[in-house]
Image (spheres, helix red, strand yellow):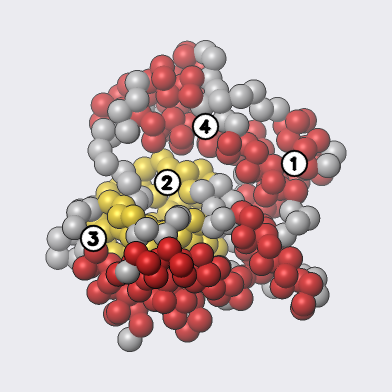
């Protein structure tokens, strides 16, 4: 089976837990042999495919558990909690993390729409915002295997990597998460562009009025559309993005003050209050208890 071949490739190339580079930009393998509870994280635009074991992600109270029957598609930056609570030495987790390149995905969506026309309304469009689980299909599995096979030869990787990654992107856009991803990367998705701006400017002042103006909407229309797409109100989303990023920075060894400043908090006391309200611990308590490697969560 194709999934067994993908699993063997990952086993052969990962010698430690966490992320392993493949030589293809944005494509990394990961392994986990110990349980990691769900911790704050930020998923950048990506697809995560599991071939052995299971992973868990929580977005605004909605829990997504996925294994080798479904892959996770997250086409916009999202503040989540994620972990590998079932991983162990006897039940290891193996998977692949694929970043979704904004430019290439947008080009593919536009080409698909030029050939096939604009998309109609997506069935059940309001049921799973921010994150979507999609069933592995033959096209996705085959494209992923062909991509990972390049890692055995640096020349093949350099010459064919971009083309095979593009092939995988196309399989994603044609698969179960396709309409969902196509809306996020389509030229008209103002919410996705607003989220991308927030994600790259967390250390700067961000107002809802500015976000609405950038999206070309009134404040009321933007608030309504933003919550429909992400499940969260804009102010809640920005706060979650900042606090999750800060938690990740502290887990990586950054001091509390450095983390607060790095995500746009000018007031340490405000940062501490909001952090404790969200996670139930002060930033210092949380930092002391979570100085662990969280790569790959």
Mark toward the viewer: 2 or 4: 4
Residue at 72 percent of width and 59 percent of height: 186
Disc 2 versus disc 3: distance between alpha carbons? 24 Å
**The label number, if any, that marks residue 223 in the structure image:** 1
Nearer-N-terminus badge (2/3): 3
**The label number, if any, that marks residue 14 in the structure image:** 3
Q: Which residue is mark 4?
A: 242
**The label number, if any, that marks residue 124 in the structure image:** none
Q: Nearer the viewer, residue 278 or 265?
A: 265
Within 10 Å of disc 3 (Cα), the crowding (few <14, some 14-19, many 20+) is some
Nearer-N-terminus badge (2/1): 2
Q: Nearer the viewer, residue 224 or 150?
A: 150
> Could one spot residue 202 in this view of the protein?
yes
Residue at disc 2, secondary structure:
strand
Query: Quadrant of the rendered structure where residue 94 is?
Result: bottom left
Query: Quadrant of the rendered structure where residue 91 is?
Result: bottom left
Nearer-N-terminus badge (4/3): 3
Nearer-N-terminus badge (2/4): 2
Disc 2 versus disc 1: distance between alpha carbons? 23 Å
Within 10 Å of disc 2 (Cα), the crowding (few <14, some 14-19, many 20+) is many
Query: Quadrant of the rendered structure where residue 176 is?
Result: bottom right
Counting from the top left corner in percent of width and height, residue 245 is at 46, 34
Residue at 47 percent of width and 44 percent of height: 42
Counting from the top left corner in percent of width and height, residue 197 is at 65, 38
Q: Nearer the viewer, residue 281 or 194?
A: 194
Residue at disc 3, secondary structure:
loop
């Amino acid at each position: 089976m194709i999934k067994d071949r993908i699993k063997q490739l990952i086993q052969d190339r990962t010698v430690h837990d966490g992320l392993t580079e493949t030589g293809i930009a944005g494509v990394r393998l990961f392994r986990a042999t110990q349980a990691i509870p769900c911790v704050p994280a930020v998923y950048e635009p990506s697809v995560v495919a599991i071939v052995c074991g299971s992973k868990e992600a929580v977005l605004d109270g909605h829990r997504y558990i996925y294994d080798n029957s479904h892959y996770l598609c997250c086409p916009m930056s999202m503040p989540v909690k994620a972990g590998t609570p079932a991983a162990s030495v006897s039940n290891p987790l193996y998977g692949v993390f694929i970043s979704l390149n904004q430019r290439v995905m947008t080009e593919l969506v536009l080409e698909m729409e030029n050939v096939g026309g604009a998309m109609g309304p997506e069935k059940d469009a309001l049921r799973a915002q921010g994150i979507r689980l999609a069933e592995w299909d033959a096209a996705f599995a085959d494209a992923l295997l062909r991509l990972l096979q390049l890692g055995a030869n640096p020349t093949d990787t350099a010459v064919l990597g971009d083309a095979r990654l593009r092939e995988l992107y196309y399989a994603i856009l044609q698969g179960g998460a396709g309409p969902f991803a196509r809306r996020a990367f389509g030229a008209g998705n103002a919410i996705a562009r607003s989220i991308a701006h927030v994600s790259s400017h967390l250390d700067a002042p961000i107002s809802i009025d500015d976000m609405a103006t950038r999206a070309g909407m009134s404040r009321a229309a933007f608030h309504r559309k933003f919550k429909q797409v992400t499940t969260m109100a804009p102010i809640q989303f920005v706060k979650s993005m900042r606090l999750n990023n800060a938690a990740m920075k502290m887990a990586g060894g950054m001091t509390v003050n450095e983390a607060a400043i790095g995500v746009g908090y000018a007031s340490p006391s405000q940062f501490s209050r909001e952090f404790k309200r969200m996670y139930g611990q002060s930033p210092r308590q949380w930092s002391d208890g979570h100085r662990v490697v969280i790569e790959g969560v």
